[in-house]
Amino acid sequence: MGFPFLSNDLGIDLGTANTLIYVRGRGLLIDEPSVVAIDKSTKKVVAIGLEAKRMLGRTPGEIEAIRPMKDGVIADFDLVEQMLKYFIRKVQKYRFYFRPRVVIGVPSGITEVEKRAVVDSAESAGVREVYLVAEPMASAIGMGIPVNEPSGNMVIDIGGGTAEIAVLALNGMVCDMSVRIGGDEMDEAIVSYLKKTYNLLVGESTAEQIKMQIGSAFPLEDELEMEVKGRDLVAGIPKTLRITSTEIRDALNEPISTIIEAVKQALEQTPPELSADILDKGIIMTGGSSQLRGLDERLRQETNLPVNVIDEPLTCVARGSLTIIEDLEKFSPVLMSTGRRSR
């Protein structure tokens, strides 16, 4: 490794909702929404990231804001490539000398075709070496869990598009469940609840705001309420409503129950020796959507296990990915095979 100070190793969390990039020696440099705005008539990209997210649901007819990642995987290959290119260029100072090496965190349930798409888009974005790692593994490494030890750890990573549940031991995932349900599905559940119950139409951004402000998975000591503005579907005019956290909890029940069912299934499939470890250490929750109020409490009630939500759950995958690229030899057993380059 000739010039460590010039090496551009990157750890990337290519998420459905946000893309995060950690750069060796420089920390977290990118944390932006995975959104691309394009001009419909010319198909040209107008904005990427934060700027594009501001346009979601507010764009004039000819501009469309698109999220090219759906359920943790690439839905629009060209746009992901342009988005990655944009973010990678943004962090590269020395891009004329060295092309970076990257480790990218991807959902554990990803198919071979989807892996190919991620690797290809990173390579066309100017990356020299691309390695993939399953998100639960990356987040465990990002939290500093010694994944190479025989003792088992259960990690639940709930992002925008997927909930990944894995039991990790000896550099591998002993059992993993990946359900394509995350923060996005929670937002959609809120949209359809308001539509059904009140004939009120709200956009994605409003639904996300409601979830963050008063969403919960378990009864709160003091229930919350907030004002919501949307369009009345009957009268066709804007209208304002007051809604409570109790209502939103009902609305969120379906996606949350699905995630909890997956956790229970993963626990059923866990070998007894590792189950004993999980009983001692509990379940570790990470990912942006793990911050939903009372979700840890609901899991505790349903599994009778200790549940811990870690600090900075949003940045774990990207941090772990960078840790892996900084010590590839040590961590090579945790990488996914991409059908390329024998390692």
Image: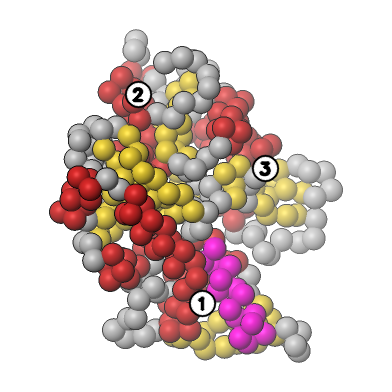
Q: Quadrant of residue 73?
A: top right
Look at the picture and state if 101 lies above or below 186: above
Q: Single out the mark in the foreground, 2 or 3.
A: 2
Q: First in sequence: mark 1 or mark 3? A: 3
Q: What residue is at 36 percent from the left and 59 percent from the top?
A: 264
Residue extending farthest left: 280
Which quadrant does the C terminus fall into?
Answer: top left
Amino acid type, residue under disc 1 in the picture: Ala
Residue 191 position within the rendered picture, expressed as x and y whole percent measured from the top left: 60, 73
Q: What residue appears at the point 70 percent right and 46 percent down from the top-left corner?
A: 46
What kind of secondary structure does the magenta stretch mostly adopt? helix
> Where's residue 87, x and y in %?
53, 37
Within the image, what quadrant is residue 319 found in? top left
Residue that lies at the very extreme toward the top in this rendered image: 2
Q: Earlier in the sequence, mark 2 or mark 3?
A: 3
3D distance between C-alphas at marks 2 and 1: 42 Å
- What residue is pinned by disc 3? 76
Q: CA distance from mark 1 to mark 3?
A: 29 Å
Q: Tell me the number on the disc at residue 251.
A: 1
Residue carrying label 2: 332
**Residue 156 shows in this picture:** no
Q: For marks 1 and 3, give the one nearer the viewer.
A: 1
**Which three-letter amino acid code belongs to the residue tagged 2?**
Ser
Q: Is residue 196 magenta?
A: yes
* Secondary structure category for the residue under label 3: loop
> Do labels 2 and 1 touch, CB within 8 Å?
no
Q: What residue range appears in magenta?
A: 185-199
Secondary structure at numbered mark 1: helix
Residue 235 lies left or right of residue 299; in this view the side is: right
How busy is the neighbourhood of tag 1: few (under 14 within 10 Å), some, or many (20 plus)? many
| Left or right: where 41 falls relative to 309 | right
